[in-house]
Amino acid sequence: LGIPWGGRLQPADLNAGVFYVVAIASLSTVALIMAGWASNNKYSLFGGMRSAAQIVSYEIPTMMILLVPVMIVGSLSLQDITRAQAGGLQNWFVFRYFPILPVAFVAFFVAGLAETNRAPFDIPEAESELVGGFHTEYSGFFFACFFMAEYTEMFILSATASVLFLGGYLAPHPALQQIGPVPMGWFWIWFKAWFLIFVMMWLRWTLPRSRVDQLMDIAWKVLLPIALVLVVVVGGLVL
């Protein structure tokens, strides 16, 4: 952690914000597998297995793309990544090193759609073949818990993407960062996160559901090679 020998641990020394978000987000796989297995229903079990395969597959390119802004900034701290984008819209990572970082943002968002089981990657709950998937046997409050968790994960993904590529709590222009005595950082991070959630919902009504083989092909044959190229190219640029 970079703490001097014998020194006291301070909150500012915990340079692990990105790592913490990734670690917590990975726990959803266990819950979905257990939900499908505990139902004693083969369709629910298939849904849980599909969800595990999908999340584990898409986590690999997601984690590799996360390394792109981390390498540029040289820190795992979400605060440091946000401060590195200060100065206005032109300094946000999504608009820098064209076309490398714009491609990284799109790939991260697509992988995030799959990790949150959003269309067109909602294969684990495909009504046409799995009768609802891992949540078939759950109703009422338990059904609500599944989808409350899904929408919470959507917000976490959108907020993380906002911090990593869209400047986090920074305004598009420094003059808009504070209006009178009121700091507007809270408004900008919420606005960016909710805009990305709107895009997710928009895609749900626009794109058809992909097949299972297409889903896995996108992860292993499209996103993973893109992530590898991005990591190598950005690593070279940083060096």
Image (cartoon, rainbow, N blue to C red):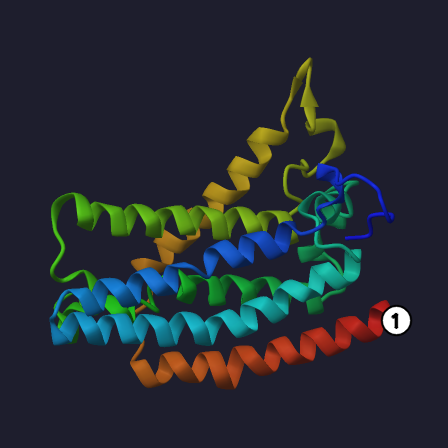
Q: Residue at x 43, y 52 (%)?
A: 199
Give x and y (percent) for residue 10.
Answer: 75, 37
The answer to which of 125 and 141 lies nearer the viewer is 141
Give x and y (percent) for residue 157.
Answer: 49, 53
Q: Residue at x 56, y 50 (%)?
A: 160
The amino acid type found where label 1 is placed reads: Leu
Q: Residue furthest top?
A: 181
The residue carrying mark 1 is 239
Q: Residue 28 falls in which quadrant of the image?
A: bottom left
Give x and y (percent) for residue 93.
Answer: 71, 55
The answer to which of 132 and 29 lies nearer the viewer is 29
In the image, taking residue 201 as reference, residue 156 lies left or right, namely: right
Counting other residues with Cα less than 10 Å from the Cα at mark 1, is it few (<14), some (14-19), or many (20 or more)?
A: few
Residue 214 vertical position relative to residue 209 in the rendered view, above or below:
below
Q: Residue at x 78, y 60 (%)?
A: 72
Examine the rendering and report whether any part of residue 99 can be seen.
Answer: no
* SS label for mark 1: loop
